[in-house]
Amino acid sequence: MARSIIGLGVRNMAAQSSQMLPLETPVPEFSLPSTDGSLVSSADFAGTRALLIVFVCNHCPYVIHVRHDLEKLYEDYSPLGVGMVAINSNDIDEYPEDSPANMRERAEEWGWRFPYLFDEDQSVAKALTAACTPDAFLFANGLLAYRGQLDSSRPNNGVPVSGADIRRAIEAVLAGDVPDPEQHPSLGCSIKWKPGNDPLYLTDDL
């Protein structure tokens, strides 16, 4: 069973780790609504040098911990041709704090300028074997080049938030290199699956 998060003040949270989708998996096709009312699709990023997809939600303490660094990633790498989206796949019937209306509020509060998308049927999360928030996936030339943690910082572990792991991967891609295949899973709140929609790829290793 996934272990409960202790002392983070969030109800019904459970920790889960990245499933580490095989590298070179193609980016899935998607078209999802954004907090600004538009539809954002994978095709919109066809001309980018890389695409970073990060699964997040509004209330997860692990996401709140890195919220400013996510915007800093966009600020630093968007001008260099890196596309970026955040995706919320949580069941909003059970977790109404993750509703699209609240997504808009959080994006504004946190100063996010990249698209924040709602994966209502959870199909994009399943296509990428997403398991937790945050869970990062970096694609180059349409193929998965990195997946896992942003860095080794976690709430209350004393490690400064830096985005070091994902930044090394992005820099490698921008230099025309392949990121180091030794990559580390993220740890965060489990994605909140709709009843009966739990994916088969999840493990009980936590």
Image (cartoon, rainbow, N blue to C red):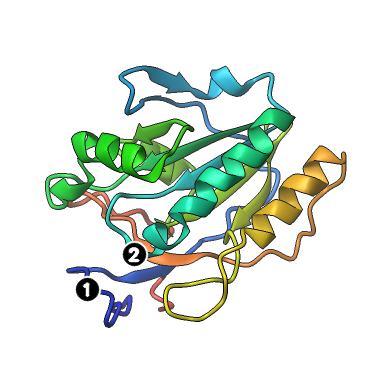
**Label 2 or label 1, whichever comes before in sequence order:** 1
Percent across and percent down for residue 141 are 74, 31
- State whether residue 68 appears in this view: yes
Tell which of 30 and 82 is nearer to you: 82
Q: How many marks?
A: 2
20 left or right of 100?
Answer: right
Label 1: which secondary element: loop
Tell which of 183 and 79 is nearer to you: 79
Percent across and percent down for residue 29 are 51, 26
Position of the C terminus by quadrant:
bottom left
Report the residue at 34% width, 43% height from top. 88
Q: Does 7 appear above or below 177?
A: below
Reading the image, the residue beneath label 2 is: 61
- State whether residue 143 appears in this view: no
70 left or right of 94?
Answer: right
Label 2: which secondary element: helix
Report the residue at 47% width, 41% height from top. 127
Q: Are marks 2 and 1 in contact (CB under 8 Å)?
A: yes
Percent across and percent down for residue 73 are 60, 45
- Amino acid bearing label 1: Gly
Position of the N terminus by quadrant:
bottom left
Percent across and percent down for residue 86 are 45, 40
Question: Would you identify the image quadrant in which residue 6 lies?
Answer: bottom left
CA distance separating discs 2 and 1: 9 Å
Q: Does 51 appear above or below 161?
A: above
- Amino acid bearing label 2: Pro
Q: Residues within 10 Å of mark 1 (few under 14, many from 20)?
A: few
Label placed on residue 9: 1
Report the residue at 23% width, 46% height from top. 98
Report the residue at 35% width, 53% height from top. 199
170 left or right of 28?
Answer: right
Q: Residues within 10 Å of mark 2 (few under 14, many from 20)?
A: many
